[in-house]
Amino acid sequence: MSTVPPTPAAGAADPETRAADLRRVLADHAHRYYVLDEPQIPDAEYDRLFQELQAIEAAHPTLVTADSPTQRVIGAVLDGLDPVRHAVPMLSIHTETDTTPAGAQKFDARVRKALGLADDAPPLAYLAELKFDGLAINLRYEHGELVQAATRGDGETGEDVTHTVRMIATVPKRLRGAAATLAPVIEVRGEVFMRRDDFEALNERQRKLIDEGAKGEKTFVNPRNAAAGVVRQLDAGKAAKRPLSFFAYALGDVVGWDVPATQHGLGVALRAMGLPVNNDSERVLGADGLVRFHEAIAVRRDALPFDIDGVVYKLDDRAQQEQLGFKSREPRWAVAHKYPAQEQMTVVRDIDVQVGRTGKLTPVAKLEPVFVGGTTVSNATLHNEDETRRKDVRVGDTVIVRRAGDVIPEVVSVVLDPSTAQASPSSAQGERKERSEPFDLYQRLGGKCPICGSDIAREAEEVDWRCTGGLFCPAQRKQAILHFAQRRALDIEGLGDKLVDQLVDAGLIRTLPELYTLGLAKLIALERMGEKSAQNLLAGLAESKRTTLARFLYGLGIRHVGETTAKDLAKHFGSLDRLMDATEEQLLQVNDVGPIVAQSLHTFLRQPHNREVIEQLRAVGVTWEESEGTAGNAAPLPLAGKTFVLTGTLPTLGRDDAKDRIEAAGGKVSGSVSKKTHYVVAGEGAGSKLDKARELGVAVIDEAALLELLGSAHG
Ligand code: IVH
């Protein structure tokens, strides 16, 4: 494939040197994958390098070494987890990388030949299963009791992960049924994996933790990597919060139990014992049956809740399996038939920024088109600016893109030295050849929304930059109209999301005021719009014009201005003009308005577009009653705009008492310490919040100092 950076300099070296290079590089990547749980290249790239080595060794058998990755099951034992010697080795299966039907046909032909079947003999029965993309685990049950769980490791020796596997809800601690209880040993093998939704949620949480400054946290590149990380966690409690799933599909050591005569029967028996067995597997006949299964699953692949990288075919009859036996430690009776990889390497041509429905600005990598997860991908999300910088994705970089399921394709990581096969293991963190700069969203956009040209802003403690265009920005229009029309805002009867879509898509409404210039003729021209409903909408619109200042403010959809804040603002200023002229400091005087709200409101009201929309709404007849407002009457509150965190026991003030007083003085009380906290009020027995405050350099005060700040209102 021309889009993938060329696999390095094959042919430049003599076969012996090349084979040695490949072995070293493959060992390095295997270490990153199995031991560090931090793969640096996509599996597809690893497979390519592996196959190149296999080809060299096949052509030059004298070059094969005992330690070649082609000669053994790779994997290693991590320090900290106890080694477990497998009673029966955990083997791998042959992988058919030809993703066309030929892959299945070749397997069926091999099996028939090995069984010595005549060409006209009836088709063989197979069990076709999904190939789950997780990690293989051996569960050892003694008299029905789960006594140990181990990873595959190098196939002979794995790691004891009983503590984390016990946390998986669907792994039974006890098997059901008399047969299982009577059996001294039943080892069940299967795959531990993470569902895609669980993976997305986990990474979302990780991103948040990292943004909040948590140390030692990272995001995971894909569900399999996350599952491996969680299973090999030393801390079972932490593992418990990161949901894993399990499917059983094979046996290990068995003592005192009659193993069913077919692979299909095994699935039935395991299910009866209470083990989770995936029910997408199917008993099929002959090569045709295998091909049909492969194709049917390919169609459903994206809709599955978890990643698969292929399907597995197993000869159904166990007696026939035994007849076939093994070849170089792989069963002859089973094969893995792959699908196109869900991760590939490609090059970032540019980084664009897209505007979402709420004005959120998302950096998107424009890629050298690459075939991944079954389609050609040329855009991949980078989530946000921080994430882009964390991964340090730059224009010109070689990156790994992942496209799995319905999830938007994403850039997983940068491959700093794409000529991997020439890199020595220690130089994997290579230098960029070209000069490039870390991504800077503001600079990239010149500070303006690429759709409407309004200023962009990123508020403190927010990860996303946003377009401040609000009502004016077409990308945000539909959302804004719906918000404006909702019951608690202008309450426009008859205006729902379908109609808003229609109106905006037909170009009838570009800004909120245009709602009020809609005429009957235009409405009736819309699809599925009768005269009666058009009349109703017009009546609803007319009625909505008489409103209140609070509803109007809330309806504008200003970030951080919810219903309560809108009411407080209306009460405080009494008039829209006074509010529009207020400085940030004056806004901070309003009950419950802190720096975030004040800044958001102030920015919104400074945008000429927004002021224009407000003027036009008034011009088309949206009205409310104004009042004097309470602003002039109150002395400025002493703690306006200040955020406090309370920790420990204060000498005289109860926690609620302290909170009430701070709030009455215009301050805010928050539950956690961040860079934005102004004061941490510490009392007896203060713990982690105090540490955090010291770490972040936040002012720590005692009760006496708090009372002082409150204006000595004590007593
Ligand atoms: S059977 C002797 N069935 O793929 C046969 N393996 O290289 C043992 N895998 O290590 C494996 N889904 O981690 C089998 N339905 C399935 C599977 C499956 C995923 C994994 C497993 C194994 C590797 C095969």
Image (cartoon, rainbow, N blue to C red):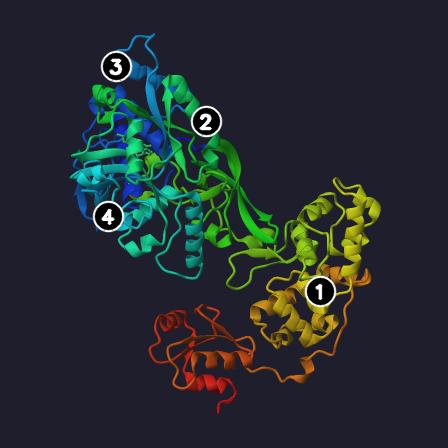
Location of mark 4 (residue): 162
Location of mark 1 (residue): 552
Residue 132 percent across, percent down from the top left: 36, 36
Report the residue at 77% width, 42% height from top.
526
| Marker disc for residue 365 | none
Q: CA distance from mark 4 to mark 2?
A: 36 Å
Looking at marks 2 and 3 on the same chain, the residue that comes earlier in the sequence is marked by: 3
- Quick one: quadrant of the N terminus? top left
Query: Badge 1, how many Cα within 10 Å: few under 14, some, many 20+?
Result: many
Residue 239 versus residue 288 in the image, above or below: below
Residue 110 versus residue 602 in the image, above or below: above
Looking at marks 3 and 1 on the same chain, the residue that comes earlier in the sequence is marked by: 3
Mark 4 lies on a secondary structure that is: helix
CB within 8 Å, label 2 to label 1: no
Residue 476 percent across, percent down from the top left: 65, 52
Specify the quarter for ligand 1.
Answer: top left
Location of mark 3 (residue): 115
Report the residue at 60% width, 52% height from top.
445
Relative to 366, 294 lies left or right: left
Instruction: Say which amino acid is labelled 4.
Output: Thr
Query: Badge 3, how many Cα within 10 Å: few under 14, some, many 20+?
Result: few
CB within 8 Å, label 3 to label 4: no
Location of mark 2 (residue): 296
Residue 272 percent across, percent down from the top left: 30, 37
Report the residue at 40% width, 50% height from top.
219
Looking at marks 3 and 4 on the same chain, the residue that comes earlier in the sequence is marked by: 3
The front one of 107 and 16 is: 107
